[in-house]
Image: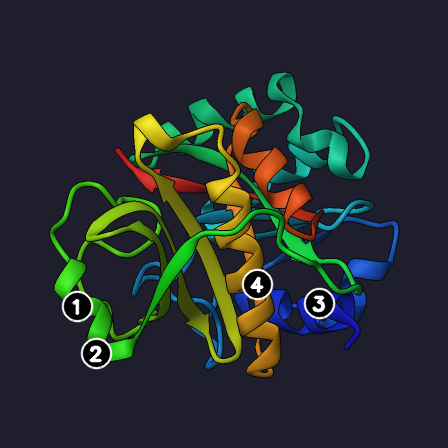
């Protein structure tokens, strides 16, 4: 499967653009729309959202920001607009309309080769309804949603266990049809033992085996999470930033 081609199709529904827009050098500014098949992290249209797969940027934003964004797009070419000095120029404009910049999300796609998990741990698998037993458990803020979300349901959970004790959990939510986002939590006293990489690797393989696309996201400064992604058979693929209500 050509994951990059599938990524462009998926992001084009989020950003109300054409898949081919990610292959050109010019930046693209589009208007918000609630397109069927988009990832649903909010029921509202984007107020401001910017994505890059490495060359240009696509910005999906409310028309009230047009004048500010025309000036913003003149500041730098493509992905350089994600540099902090450039992003900071947007903050006052967003504040005028009751919004603030979100964190930047650094996103990963799988590499096209088999990943053989390192290590050996006892595991337990849970699917769909079986996952609900874990909702409300504060140990797993990244592996699963805090509660059942029908718009992006948790589909698979795999736990590394020692007897009845859970050492770590990896889970995936179907953020749009066929796209499973992986999250990982390892209990503090069991970190740096390869459990995170092992769980993410076997979950990645399971998702691909099921015919879906696994993806992974983290923050720019979370080096430990970046290392887990890379060791588990992922590569950096795109970056995005949005706006939240103040």
For label 4, count other residues whose C-alpha is less than 10 Å away and answer few (under 14), some (14-19) or many (20+). many
Q: Does the residue at mark 4 contact the one at mark 1 (Cβ under 8 Å)?
A: no
Residue at 57% over, 78% down: 212
Mark 2–mark 1 CB contact (< 8 Å): yes
Given contact means CB atoms under 8 Å apart, are the residues at marks 3 and 1 in contact?
Answer: no
Under tag 1, what secondary structure? helix
Q: Which residue is mark 2?
A: 129
Q: Marks 3/4: CA distance?
A: 20 Å
**Residue position marked by numbered label 1 in the rendering:** 132
Give me the residue at 15% from left, 58% from top: 135
Give x and y (percent) for residue 194. 53, 38
**Helix, strand or loop at mark 3:** helix
Q: Which numbered mark, 3 or 1, is in the foreground of this view? A: 1
Residue 175 on image: x %, y %:
43, 67
Frontmost of labels 3 and 4 is 4
Q: Are there few (<14), some (14-19), or many (20+) residues within 10 Å of tag 3? A: some
What residue is shown with label 3? 8
- Cα separation between marks 3 and 1: 32 Å
Q: Secondary structure at mark 4?
A: helix
Residue 204, disc: 4
The numbered mark, 3 or 4, whose residue comes first in the sequence reads: 3
């Amino acid at each position: 499967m050509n994951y990059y081609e599938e990524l462009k199709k998926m992001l084009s529904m989020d950003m109300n653009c054409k898949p081919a827009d990610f292959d050109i050098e010019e930046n693209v500014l589009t208007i918000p729309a609630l397109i069927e098949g988009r990832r649903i992290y909010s029921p509202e249209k984007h107020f401001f959202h910017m994505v890059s797969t490495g060359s240009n940027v696509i910005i999906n934003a409310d028309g009230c920001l047009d004048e500010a964004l025309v000036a913003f797009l003149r500041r730098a070419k493509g992905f350089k607009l994600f540099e902090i000095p450039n992003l900071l120029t947007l903050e006052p404009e967003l504040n005028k309309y009751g919004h603030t910049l979100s964190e930047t999300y650094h996103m990963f796609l799988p590499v096209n080769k088999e990943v053989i998990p390192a290590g050996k741990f006892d595991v337990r698998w849970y699917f769909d309804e079986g996952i609900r037993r874990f909702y409300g458990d504060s140990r797993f803020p990244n592996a699963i949603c805090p509660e059942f979300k029908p718009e992006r349901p948790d589909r698979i959970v795999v736990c590394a266990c020692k007897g009845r004790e859970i050492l770590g959990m990896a889970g995936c939510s179907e953020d749009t049809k066929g796209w499973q986002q992986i999250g990982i939590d390892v209990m503090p006293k069991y970190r740096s033992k390869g459990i995170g990489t092992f769980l993410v690797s076997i979950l990645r393989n399971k998702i691909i085996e099921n015919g879906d696309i696994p993806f992974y996201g983290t923050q720019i400064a979370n080096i430990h999470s970046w290392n887990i992604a890379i060791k588990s058979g992922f590569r950096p693929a795109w970056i995005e930033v949005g706006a939240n209500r103040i």
